[in-house]
Image: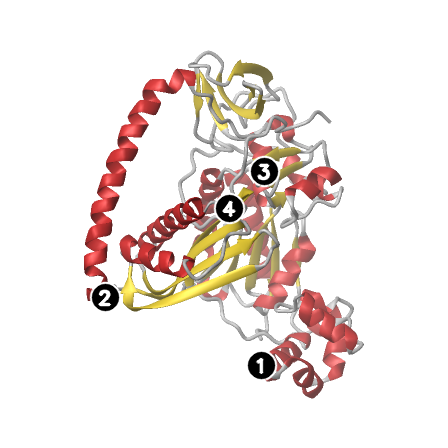
Amino acid sequence: MRRAPTILHLDMDAFYASAEQAAKPSLRGKPVVVGGIGPRGVVSTASYEARVFGVRSAMPTAQARRLCPNAAYLTPRFTLYRRVSDQVMELLHALSPLVEPLSLDEAFVDLEAGGTEADTAAARAVGERLRRDIRRTTGLTGSVGLAGAKMLAKIASEQAKPDGLVVIEPGTERELLGPMTVRTLPGVGPATAETLRRAGIHTIAETAEAGEAELVRLLGKAHGTGLYAMALGRDERPVVAERDAKSISVEDTFDVDLTDRTRVRAEVMRLADRCVERLRAAGRSGRTVVIKVRNYDFSTLTRSETLRGPTDDPGVVREAAGRLLDLVDTTGGVRLLGVGVTGLADFTQEDLFAQLATEKAAEEEAERERRVAAEAAREVADEPERPRRWLPGLDVIHEEHGAGWVQGSGVGRVTVRFEQPWSGPGRVRTFPVDDPALRPGEPLPLVGGPTEPSTGPAQEGPAQKDPAPQSSAPATLPNSVSARAASEPGTGPETESGAGMSSR
């Protein structure tokens, strides 16, 4: 434990949803839900306005629609989120070389490693400056926690939400933690909390009073010992700049259960290819191939096969995934499939026994690519007759009206709202889905557009802590944003919707 609160935890406020509100002036101050919009979709992020109605992350989208039917339900735009994340991480790296990203919108920073003095006033000044810089650069808000340990800094940032800063002074940890529920501590999930509840332990203070021996008896040595230390406010984990991934995987949830064995195998092969793409992008190889199958009744099976050596060969991974699939009965219907690789390494070792199979797979892949290219050429020729698929929230460009975003689609029509982050709420127009003047677009920067005054709610003003900070506009307009690579949360595939947003 440090004697000064020089470990900083940043957590962006309702990140995906606030980015959408900043990009779409008509949604500012209104409930926004980002995630899978299909019948089996899952909420990734809900704006603070939607949380008032009980909508939460990881909630089924169908349940969210029942709780908040008038919210805007949007497809995630990860290109935008990664760009904004890159800007935020650049600001953090300017504070210290020791930055530990946890996700696109969350990270720890060791301020002492960056030269910040080990005292409360200096750490607070850095935290406040960071919040101002984030708002100036991205137009969004983030909450900052400062403490002498990572666990406490994260708790502080949670208390600071939204758009605030909380400092936990060293020496005050137990007084602060005592009345909090035991679920506040890292590693305490529903099962652990239930075990402690049956033992009469509900708060962190009661956890500390139970003693290490009792916690070890209830939870086992490793978990019990660690939980006791955290209940006392002790956390010696350092900020680690590079966090080594243990596995790389992809998965998809299907709107309708798959019962055709041929379709199931084709999906597994496709997922295997995507997994290898991520593996290679990370410059890694893996030794163990894993498949995940969730059946119609929500029962989930995993099967794994360890190869003779690490590989990043798509043919080898596909072949192993196919063998594993043969071990699973999918006749009842499959709602989710996943393929992953574990046992990661920085090199590959050719599997001589798989060489012939790999060469054959490469030939098949080349033939498949030729067929796909021919089919794509036919599709391009047939494009005017084919309906397009416009998902709510995605960017579009119209030759006459300019940039906008899809508000909804269905029955052969697509509704588009034409507005930009720096404008006021825009006009809504409806087009045929095959309108040749309408095409997909790229996300616009949240700040950095035209500097002339806007007529909508995107007026500048001082940053204030309120329940919906995302509804305010950026304070200034820097120039650009840049891309950042990161994995996507598994919200599952989305389906077309004719109700991207209802009037409120």
Label 4 belongs to which residue?
259
Which element type, helix, strand or loop, lies under badge 2?
loop
Q: Nearer the viewer, mark 4 or mark 3?
A: 4
| Spot occupied by residue 473 in the image (x, y as percentages of width and height) | 60, 32
Q: Quadrant of the N terminus?
A: bottom right
Label 1 belongs to which residue?
222
Q: Nearer the viewer, mark 2 or mark 4?
A: 4
Query: Could you classify mark 2 by the number of other residues whose Cα lies within 10 Å: few (under 14), some (14-19), or many (20 or more)?
Result: some
Which element type, helix, strand or loop, lies under badge 4?
loop
Label 2 belongs to which residue?
349
Q: Quadrant of residue 207?
A: bottom right
Question: Front-most of 377 and 225?
Answer: 377
Label 3 belongs to which residue?
38
| Spot occupied by residue 141 in the image (x, y as percentages of width and height) | 60, 44
Left or right: 160 in relation to 101: right
Residue 97 seen anywhere in this rendered image of the structure? no
Of mark 2 and mark 1, the one earlier in the sequence is 1
Of mark 2 and mark 4, the one earlier in the sequence is 4
Distance CA(mark 4)–CA(mark 3): 19 Å
Q: Quadrant of residue 299?
A: bottom right
Of mark 1 and mark 3, the one earlier in the sequence is 3
Query: Could you classify mark 1 by the number of other residues whose Cα lies within 10 Å: few (under 14), some (14-19), or many (20 or more)?
Result: few
Distance CA(mark 1)–CA(mark 3): 41 Å
